[in-house]
Image (cartoon, rainbow, N blue to C red):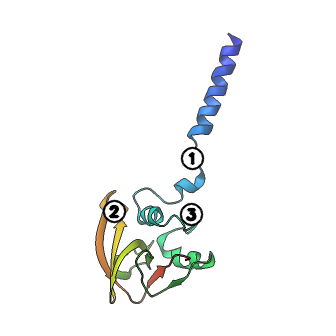
Amino acid sequence: MQWFKGALAVVAVLGMFLSARPAAVDAYASCNCTAYAHSRRPDLPMTLGNARSWGVRARANGFRVDSNPRVGDVMVLQPGVQGASRTYGHVAYVTAVSGNRVSVRQMNGGEGCWVSRTVFHTGRGVQFIHRRW
């Protein structure tokens, strides 16, 4: 009977180990803009923080960040810009560019856990994180 209790303890410890997720998995809250943008751009680090800090931190990690959008970029809106959260800002994945109009796919925890499409424009408080290629 003693071996049985020992085996149960081992199974319990293994179960906790196997079900534990790395901290990086939880770096971006499910259904938020950051989680969606990172799912479209897994080449970006999991350490970019809230949307407002993505441009600065991506640049510090060697990514080119500027105001010229391209398809495949992550668009960063600073807090309060074009309706972005006044606290966290917003990020979205660029799907099309026409002049200063930028079509994106995005997720927003405040709207539920689904992807939506919308159009933003370039200008003050808007940056684009490019791929490294």
Label 2: which residue?
A: 110
Residue type at mark 1 is: Arg
Q: Quadrant of residue 132?
A: bottom right
The amino acid type found where label 3 is placed reads Met
Q: Residue at x 67, y 26 (%)?
A: 10
Circle 1 is placed at which residue position?
21
Which mark is drawn over residue 46?
Answer: 3
Q: Residue at x 40, y 75 (%)?
A: 86
- Per the image, label 3 sits on a secondary structure element best described as loop
Residue type at mark 2 is: Gly
Mark 3 or mark 2, earlier in chain: 3
Quarter of the rendering occupied by the N terminus: top right
Q: Is residue 87 above or below residue 31?
A: below
How crowded is the residue under tag 3: few (<14 C-alpha within 10 Å), some, or many (20+)?
some
Residue plotted at (64% across, 32% down): 13
Q: Residues within 10 Å of mark 2 (few under 14, many from 20)?
A: few
Work out whether residue 47 or residue 133 is closer to the camera in this orientation and state it.
Answer: 133
Q: In what element is the residue under mark 2?
A: helix
For the residue pair 90 and 68, the one nearer the viewer reads as 68
The residue that appears at 69% across and 20% down in the rendered structure is 6
- Quadrant containing the C terminus is bottom right
- Considering only order in the chain, which callout, 1 or 3, is on the residue closer to the N terminus? 1
